Amino acid sequence: MLIPLRKEALNDMIPAIATGTQYAYYWANLSTLLKNLFISLIGVLIFLLLGAIFGEGFEGISLILIVTVGLYWLWGPVYWASVRNGKYRRYQYVGFWRGRVLDVYISEEVVNESSALDKLGKVIIVENLQKKINVEIGDKSGFRTTISSPLQRIHKVINRGQAVEGLLLSNDPDFMRISKVTDIYIPRHKLWVGEYPYLRRDIFLDVRKQLAKIYG
């Protein structure tokens, strides 16, 4: 089932400014925070150096740049989440979609690589792997796609045949070509699945309640 929605609905459910869950996604973990703090530190040092080179005439601009880059660790997640949201908000047509889980399987993905020395002193590459759940979804029209997410214990309740809901995005008014799919919702378990939390979940759930009253 695909129910076209107004463009305003897309803008409401995928806001221009990052939500709390989207901000948390880009903070991710301690290593991400440390990386952002390092970027801030390097930026501050660069602009301090430029300030020393160019003298008093550069002081005002240098101070603004130092404060801005010094707080990158704080505003960076907002910026990157907003950029990611903007790529979805640019689509002209949006539809509320309901389909089924066609298949569920686990895979492993290389998150990053690091080097280490073995007992013989040789350099070896250590791959840090992350397990992911892959949920293949589709409907009677023949539309099929796969949504992936870092594996969590709660995902074990996902099975074939369960209903799923989400938004389909397209620049085609007839939705003959689907460009993007948001994170998905599994009503039976009140469970969200997706790599990135695109949707304002409270608004999405309100919309689905309103559509249920109209379409049953």
Image (tube, rainbow, N blue to C red):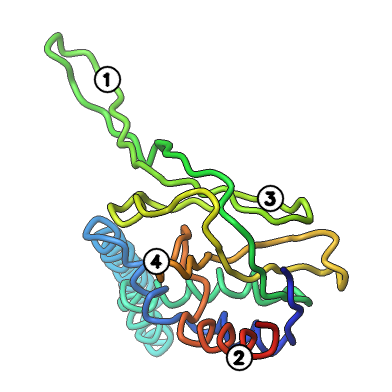
- Under mark 1, the amino acid is Ile
Q: Are marks 1 and 3 in contact (CB under 8 Å)?
A: no
Q: Secondary structure at mark 4?
A: loop
Give neighbour class at mark 1: few <14, some 14-19, many 20+ (Cα, 10 Å): few
Q: Earlier in the sequence, mark 4 or mark 2?
A: 4
Foreground of the two, 68 or 216: 216
Residue 51 percent across, percent down from the top left: 35, 76
> Dividing the image into 4 quarters, which one contains the N terminus?
bottom right
Residue at numbered disc 1: 124
Relative horizontal placement of residue 50, taking residue 198 as reference (left or right):
left
Circle number at residue 189:
4
Mark 1 or mark 3, earlier in chain: 1
The quadrant where residue 33 appears:
bottom left
Q: Earlier in the sequence, mark 2 or mark 1?
A: 1
Residue 163, quarter of picture = bottom right
Q: Which mark is in front, 2 or 1?
A: 2
Residue 169: mark in rendering: none
Circle 2 packing at 10 Å, graded few (<14), some (14-19), many (20+), is few
> How many other residues sit within 10 Å of disc 3, few (<14), some (14-19) or many (≥20)?
some
Task: Identify the residue shown where x is 33% and y is 34%.
Answer: 113
Question: Which secondary structure, mark 2?
Answer: helix
Residue 144: image tag: 3
- Give me the C-alpha separation between circle 1 and circle 4: 43 Å
x, y percentage for residue 60?
Answer: 39, 90
Decide which of tag 1 and tag 4 comes sooner along the chain: 1
Q: Tell me whether circle 2 and circle 3 mark residues in contact (CB < 8 Å).
A: no
Q: Mark 4, residues whose alpha carbon is within 10 Å: few (<14), some, or many (≥20)? A: few
What is the three-letter code of the residue carrying label 3?
Arg
Question: Looking at the image, is mark 2 or mark 3 earlier in the sequence?
Answer: 3
Taking depth in this image into account, of 164 and 110 the one nearest to the observer is: 164
Q: What residue is drawn where x is 17% and y is 16%?
A: 118
